Image (cartoon, helix red, strand yellow):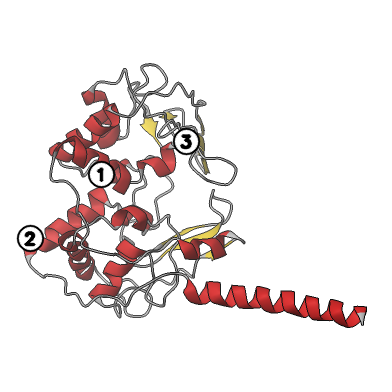
Amino acid sequence: MLKKILILLVALVVAITAGGATYFYVAFPKMRPAPQMAAPTTPEAIERGKYLAEAITGCVACHSPIDESRPGDFPQPGLEYAGRVFPAGSGFPGKIVAPNLTPDRETGIGQWTDGEIVRAIREGVSRDGRPLFPLMNYPNYRDLSDEDALSIVAYLRTRKAVTRANGKTELDFPVGTMIRMVPKPLEGPPPGIPASGVERGHALVRIMMCGECHTPRDDRGNPIAGKELAGGNEFRGAWGTVYAANITSHPSSGIGAYSNDDLKRVLREGKNRAGRELWVMPWSITRNLTDADLDALIAALREVPASPNLVPAAQVSAPSVSR
């Protein structure tokens, strides 16, 4: 009798676990059908989309194989938007694939609808219902207006189709399971990016993912509270080891002693106050910002609370390189 009871209990536990797992995979990611939308085809919309993709959202940097021989995250010529693979061991929980965004019908987005692309950008769900790893900054891209999101689609549609299969993202357990809970359907009209001023700058800090590189993280990869943008994250590559700078307003550890012109040089030329080149920092993107957006971004960084966090010196193969 006792043996039968134990068998029944084990069977019950297995059934509950299986049922819970089934419910989880059915219930998440939360998604809605892709909206019926049509991207405009006007020159103005395409130019707006280009600016967003190559200056603000940075699509071209994450979705293009990078020329590793030079600083700044410059795409390899001819392969812009053809996809990028972040291999296991590069600081992510597994292999991350930023897919091909060219109009190629087999390996790119040529068969996607405009609504499916917009849903992926703002809600983090692929065409086939897979959750996207939030290196794709959809938790903040969800603020993009319909006009901005569709302008990006309009621009991507004009790119030359490149046939390039990159494979699929392969995440370590349990991250691959837990990210299913990250995507969220829009519940109303997005607010859009503020038009100007420091409010726009703060939105740019979020949308341009400054915190992804410059905010220290704990052993689980979560941002450490109270150290927003305080730097110190380590990045390794063929060029050596560099550390994300402290970009809080601290006068010695951060950017408090940098003039606005110093910061513009960082963002436009990829050089620090000493004139040394910056690796990993994607200044190939930030150099495309308009003067107004550059001013707004700098104004927002000036408002970041000072942190005394000291960042280690870079160890690079080229003597002219710094963090």
The amino acid type, in three-letter code, at marker 2 is: Glu
Mark 1 or mark 3: name the one nearer the start of the chain.
Answer: 1
Label 1 Cα crowd, 10 Å radius (few <14 / some 14-19 / many 20+): many
Name the residue carrying label 1. Answer: 203
**Looking at this view, is 194 or 288 the one in front?**
194
- x, y percentage for residue 92? 53, 52
Residue 245 lies in quadrant: top left
Q: Secondary structure at mark 2?
A: helix
- In this view, the mark in front (1 or 2): 1
Instruction: Find out whether the residues at labels 3 and 2 contact each other: C-beta distance under 8 Å.
Output: no
Name the residue carrying label 2. Answer: 44
Residue 160 lies in quadrant: bottom left
- x, y percentage for residue 60? 31, 56
The span from disc 1 to disc 3 (Cα, nearest Å) is 19 Å
Where residue 225 is drawn, which disc sits there? Answer: 3
Left or right? Give the position of 6 relative to 18: right
Label 2 Cα crowd, 10 Å radius (few <14 / some 14-19 / many 20+): few
The span from disc 1 to disc 2 (Cα, nearest Å) is 23 Å
Left or right? Give the position of 100 relative to 311: left
The amino acid type, in three-letter code, at marker 3 is: Ala
- Residue drawn where x is 88% and y is 83% of the image: 4
- In this view, the mark in front (3 or 2): 3
- Residue drawn where x is 29% and y is 31% of the image: 301
The amino acid type, in three-letter code, at marker 1 is: Ala
- Residue drawn where x is 13% and y is 38% of the image: 292
**Looking at this view, is 24 or 216 the one in front?**
24
Instruction: Find out whether the residues at labels 1 and 3 contact each other: C-beta distance under 8 Å.
Output: no
Residue 10 lies in quadrant: bottom right
Compared to residue 67, the image places residue 8 above or below, namely: below
Q: Secondary structure at mark 3?
A: loop
